Amino acid sequence: SQQGEEDPQALSIQEGENATMNCSYKTSINNLQWYRQNSGRGLVHLILIRSNEREKHSGRLRVTLDTSKKSSSLLITASRAADTASYFCATDGGGNQFYFGTGTSLTVIP
Amino acid sequence: GAVVSQHPSRVICKSGTSVKIECRSLDFQATTMFWYRQFPKQSLMLMATSNEGSKATYEQGVEKDKFLINHASLTLSTLTVTSAHPEDSSFYICSASGLAGGPDTQYFGPGTRLTVL
């Protein structure tokens, strides 16, 4: 399976704290993307980082990529209750298909 | 822009019946559409990739005769779950990519919740 793994599986933090979740994958990639999913809903694209990039920022989001370790991290700073959702990384495996990680369920407590 | 819709959003059917789910790209031409399945509290699993006008490519372990995919136009792909059984109950999500967004970009539909009784 090309599915990646994420840790932690679940994360619970207080509002205002930072949340970090990690993704490891198995194959070479062209890019890695992070998505958010509210319970029972579709996916929202958060950020794309290409294989030649090491770090990328978008608002309160910071993504890092280490292709030598085949891993990525997503940092959400100054979390809000509205950030409560599941977060998935997706890799392209070198092609145009996406393979999703196992996901991290984030709960931000007001 | 880049909106993908799915219909129906929710469907309940009896065991043994077939269910068709539609995925439409509303404001762009989708050269490639993807179908995913998501079980409760699990990740999305890619089922198949379909290019307009050609046969779908199924991932290992996905039965092509059970999950029929048709991508007859650049704005519509359908997934038919044939002879559905309770174990097929799942959240089915489609995504679409087109020339404008490039192969890196997939736009996801809101999903279809299938419950087979």
Image (spheres, helix red, strand yellow):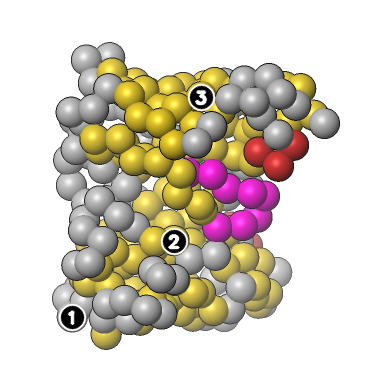
Tag 1 subunit: B
Magenta-colored span: A35-42
Q: Secondary structure at mark 3?
A: strand
Q: CA distance from mark 1 to mark 2?
A: 21 Å
* Labelled disc at residue B53: 1
Tell if the residue under mark 1 belongs to the same chain as the one under mark 2: yes
Relative placement, left or right, of A109 versus A59 is: right
Among all residues in the image, which is located at the extreme bottom?
B73
How far across and how far down the image is residue A1, in percent?
A: 32, 36
Q: Main secondary structure of the magenta part?
A: loop
For numbered disc 2, what is the local secondary structure? strand
Q: Does residue B25 sit above or below A109 in this rendering?
A: below
Residue appearing at x 18%, y 47% in the figure: A95
Q: Which residue is mark 3?
A: A75
Q: Residue at x 80, y 29 (%)?
A: A109
Q: Is residue A3 above or below residue A65?
A: below
The residues tagged by marks 3 and 2 sit, at their Cα atoms, a distance apart of 23 Å
Which tag is nearer the camera, tag 3 or tag 1?
A: 3
Would you say the residues marked 1 and 2 are in contact, meaning their CB atoms lie under 8 Å apart?
no
Callout 2 amino acid? Phe
Residue furthest right as drawn:
A110
Residue A106 place in picture, x, y as percent: 65, 31
Residue B107 sits above or below residue A110 on the image: below
Q: Is residue B18 something that shows in the picture?
A: yes
In magenta stretch: residue A50: no
The number of callouts visible is 3
Judging depth in this view, the residue of A40 and A61 nearest the camera is A61
Q: Residue at x 23, y 21 (%)?
A: A67
**From what the image shows, is residue B35 above or below residue A78?**
below
Q: Which residue is under mark 2? A: B108
Q: Residue at x 21, y 31 (%)?
A: A51
